Amino acid sequence: MISGEMKGNRKLFWRNVRMECERLCEECPTLSKWELLAAMQALAIYIIIRLDDGETEHNGFDSLLIAAVTVVAQKLTESDIAGNFSLDGSWEDWLFEESRRRLSVVYKVFNMLFYFEPAAMCDLPTDLVLAPLPAKKQLWEAGNEAMWKSESQREGEVQTEFGLTGSGDLVKLGENHGGTALVHTSITASNPARITASWEEWCEGMDGFGGLVMLAASMVI
């Protein structure tokens, strides 16, 4: 239906999208965390298709689409939904949180391309454009918990977090020790600069998603 070129297919597609947005706005409070994640993924796809289509007679409900993103994102960021991102936690918790992080990068890139109202909910320090960046490929692509545990043991208990600054630099944000929360340090008088990281080193451990980060970096340079 999405790839169909017939006018009727597009009309039906956008009618279904409208109905789905209305459903999400209504049922959001009852959705599980995985259903919320799937909803945000679907909404990201709808936004990309909307950008590709341009404005047509069938997709003129941007406000509803944005409203759906807003209510689902608000629910997804509630503290009781956030998982444990440490490598000594469970694979399922880590996978959920990493999925949220990667999806967050997609939506932040949307905000780099055009004014995206839900981005105002993000409390990212002003000196950062994207953060935290995706975890390493070996962890993300682990096919089961045993493989993930094996890769996490190679990483050790410390995960170095990276971010992209407004000047296009890759920087180290800090380290996530077990269950300790990541602390983002913004540029201030007492902290004039972050520790610059190597793009080559970061790219070595990155999967195809790294291409989106590199594209974003080229947009802010």
Image (tube, rainbow, N blue to C red):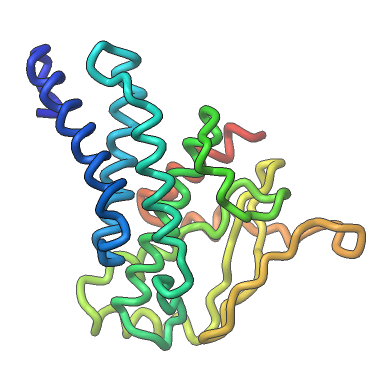
On screen, residue 56 versus residue 83, left or right, reads left
Residue situated in front as seen by the camera: 163 or 151: 163
Residue 75: image x %, image y %? 40, 59
Q: Residue drawn at (43%, 71%), measured in percent from left and top? A: 82
Where is residue 200, by image quadrant? bottom right
Residue 31: image x %, image y %? 26, 62
Q: Residue drawn at (45%, 55%), measured in percent from left and top? A: 74
Residue situated in front as seen by the camera: 92 or 73: 73
Q: Is residue 100 above or below residue 168?
A: below
Q: Residue drawn at (26%, 63%), measured in percent from left and top? A: 30
Q: In this view, does 12 lie above or below 108?
A: above
Residue 85: image x %, image y %? 45, 76
Residue situated in front as seen by the camera: 79 or 151: 79
Q: Quadrant of the N terminus?
A: top left
Q: In which quarter of the image is the C terminus?
A: top right
Q: In this view, does 30 lie above or below 91?
A: above
Q: Is residue 102 above or below residue 50?
A: below
Farthest residue, direction front:
26
Residue 60: image x %, image y %? 32, 19
On screen, residue 200 versus residue 59, left or right, reads right
- How many marks do you count on the picture? 0
Q: Residue drawn at (53%, 36%), measured in percent from left and top? A: 117
